[in-house]
Image (tube, rainbow, N blue to C red):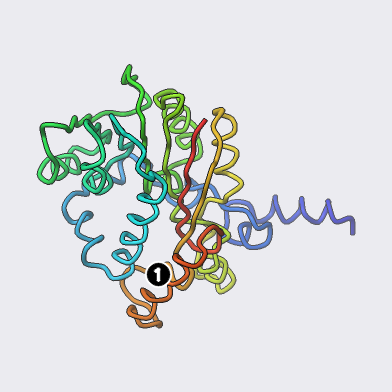
Amino acid sequence: MNLSLLKNFIKNYFRNTKFYAIFLLKPLKKEYIDKKNYTSSHFNKGEDYHIKFEKLPGRKIMWDLEKKIISDFIDNKEINNHLDFASGTGRIAKFLEKNNKEQYLLDSSKKMLEYAKKILNSNKSTFIEDDFTKINLNKKFDLITAFRFFPNAEFFLREKAMKFISEHLKYDGILIINNHYNFWSIPFFFSRLTFRNNGFGMSHKEIVKLVKINNLKIYKYKSVGLLTHKDKSSIIPWNFVSRFENYFYKKKSNHLMGYNAIYLIGR
C-alpha cells in the first residue's frame, strides 16, 4: 500500500482521538479533548490555585526551577515596565516585582486578580480584568511574561495571544513564555505510549511557528521536568526528583526533553 494513502487513512480514521497523537506524532487540538474553553475554565480559580505552587511537591519543584530560568533570561536587564499576560494570581509578577518600576497584570478571571491584589505592591501594580481579544493597552513593555497559557488555550486563542503580545512588546523588549505540556518531552512521550495521555500538548514546532508569523525570534530555551510531570504523586521519591532536576538544570538544560519548556523571545 502507498505510504501516503496509509497515512491519510490513519489521519481520517483516528482524527480527534488519542490514537491520532500516538500514530501521527502530533498533538491533538485542545477543543477535541476539553470542551471547556480556556477563559471559562479559570473563572473560579483563586487562592486554591496559587497555593498549589507552594504545597504540591511536583509543582513546587517546577516553580523553583522556573524562577531560576527567568532570572537567567532577564540577566540584569533594566525593566521599566512589565506586562504579565494571563497573570492568574500574580505568581510571576510577585517574583519579578523587585525588578521593575511598574507592572500590569492582565487576566479575565476576577477571582484570580483579587488574590493577586493581596500579594502585590499596589503602588506599582495595575490590574486589568478583561478579555485581551477585545482591548488594546496602548502601551509597550520592556518585558512580557506568559506562563501556563499557551498549551492550555485553544489554537485560535494562541494565535491571537501571540499577535497581541507582539503588538505590545517594545522593539528591544523581551518575552518569556513557557510550554508546560511539551509534546516531545520524555514524560509525555512515555505517557502516550502507555495510553495514559490523551494526546494533548504543544510542540516546539508550534511555538516556532507562532513566534515566526509575528516577526519574533527565539533566542534561548531551556526545559526542566525530565523524570515526571506529576504534581502530587510519583513512583520516584520527590527528594530524588528535586536533586536530579537541579543537577541537570546546572549542567545542561538547553534541550527539549523536559515537559516544561521555557523560551526567551525577542525581535
Q: In the image, is 116 to the left or to the right of 83? A: left
Up/down of 132 relative to 52, above or below: above
As shown in the figure, which amino acid type bears the numbered disc 1?
Answer: Asn
Q: Residue at x 56, y 71 (%)?
A: 190
Residue 265 in the image, given as x and y percentages of width and height: 49, 39
Q: In the image, is 130 to the left or to the right of 62? A: left
Q: Nearer the viewer, residue 32 or 55?
A: 55
Q: Quadrant of the N terminus?
A: bottom right
Res. 241 visible in picture = yes
Q: Residue at x 68, y 57 (%)?
A: 24
Q: Nearer the viewer, residue 123 or 28?
A: 123
Up/down of 40 relative to 243, above or below: above
Up/down of 243 relative to 17, above or below: below
Q: Nearer the viewer, residue 143 or 186?
A: 143
Q: Nearer the viewer, residue 4 or 16?
A: 4
Farthest residue in the top direction? Answer: 138
Residue, disc 1: 246
Residue 226 in the image, given as x and y percentages of width and height: 49, 69
Res. 43 visible in picture = no
Question: Please, what secondary structure does the residue beneath circle 1 have?
Answer: helix
Residue 237: name its quadrant. bottom left
Up/down of 91 relative to 193, above or below: above
Q: Residue at x 49, y 67 (%)?
A: 251
Residue 241: name its quadrant. bottom left
